[in-house]
Image (spheres, rainbow, N blue to C red):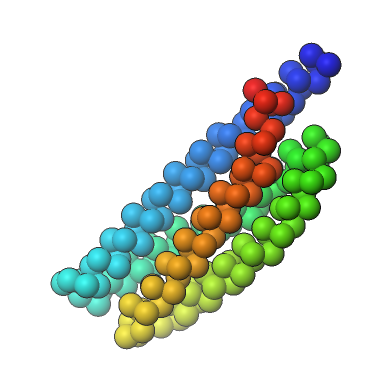
């Protein structure tokens, strides 16, 4: 039994580091989002707004990709190996909700990668901000269900 705990710690102790790095990227994305949003309310010219918008789109795509292809994958794998079927069922529901926000983020990115027209940016930023807030709440629930609940097993 002690060997199983040691093995779990070796296998899943790094998941916390992946999550920490990803949450730091979330914070960086929020800084970019706020910087662009506040700039639009004041004196940001179109060129500056375009640069900040491209930067925001890039970090959003990096964040979403890391979530789907690194973080979520590790969280699911951890729960599978710990045979936590209840957590996996809850995760399915949460992933469905996350996918909706992913679609909105991809649409936002696609729109602003293809246009220099920033006329609707303020409204689009408001909507994407709501999607991001919703996504963060769901992701936090997912981390709680798939990882935090196992912390005693991997500590």
Q: Residue at x 50, y 67 (%)?
A: 131
**Quadrant in which the N terminus is drawn:** top right
Q: Is residue 105 above or below residue 153?
A: below
Q: Nearer the viewer, residue 148 or 64?
A: 148
Q: Nearer the viewer, residue 31 or 139?
A: 139
Residue 70 seen in render: no
> What residue occupies the far left of the structure in this picture?
43
Q: Position of residue 116 (x, y in %)?
A: 35, 82
Which image quadrant is residue 135 in? Answer: bottom right
- Number of numbered labels in the structure image: 0
- Relative horizontal placement of residue 132, taking residue 144 as reference (left or right): left
Q: Residue at x 36, y 62 (%)?
A: 33
**Quadrant in which the C terminus is drawn:** top right
Which image quadrant is residue 149 in? Answer: top right
Q: Nearer the viewer, residue 120 or 70?
A: 120
Q: Residue at x 63, y 36 (%)?
A: 148
Residue 122 seen in render: yes
- Relative horizontal placement of residue 85, taking residue 64 as reference (left or right): right
Q: Is residue 36 above or below residue 14?
A: below
Q: Residue at x 77, y 49 (%)?
A: 88
Q: Position of residue 145 (x, y in %)?
A: 67, 44
């Amino acid at each position: 039994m002690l060997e199983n705990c040691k093995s779990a710690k070796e296998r899943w102790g790094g998941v916390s580091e992946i999550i920490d790095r990803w949450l730091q990227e979330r914070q960086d994305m929020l800084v970019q989002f706020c910087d662009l949003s506040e700039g639009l309310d004041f004196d940001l010219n179109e060129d500056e707004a375009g640069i900040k918008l491209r930067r925001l789109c890039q970090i959003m795509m990096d964040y979403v990709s890391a979530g789907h292809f690194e973080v979520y994958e590790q969280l699911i794998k951890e729960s599978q190996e710990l045979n936590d079927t209840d957590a996996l069922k809850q995760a399915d529901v949460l992933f469905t909700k996350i996918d909706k926000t992913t679609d909105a983020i991809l649409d936002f990115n696609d729109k602003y990668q293809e246009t220099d027209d920033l006329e609707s940016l303020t409204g689009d930023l408001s909507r994407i901000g709501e999607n991001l807030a919703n996504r963060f709440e769901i992701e936090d629930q997912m981390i709680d269900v798939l990882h935090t609940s196992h912390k005693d097993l991997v500590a």
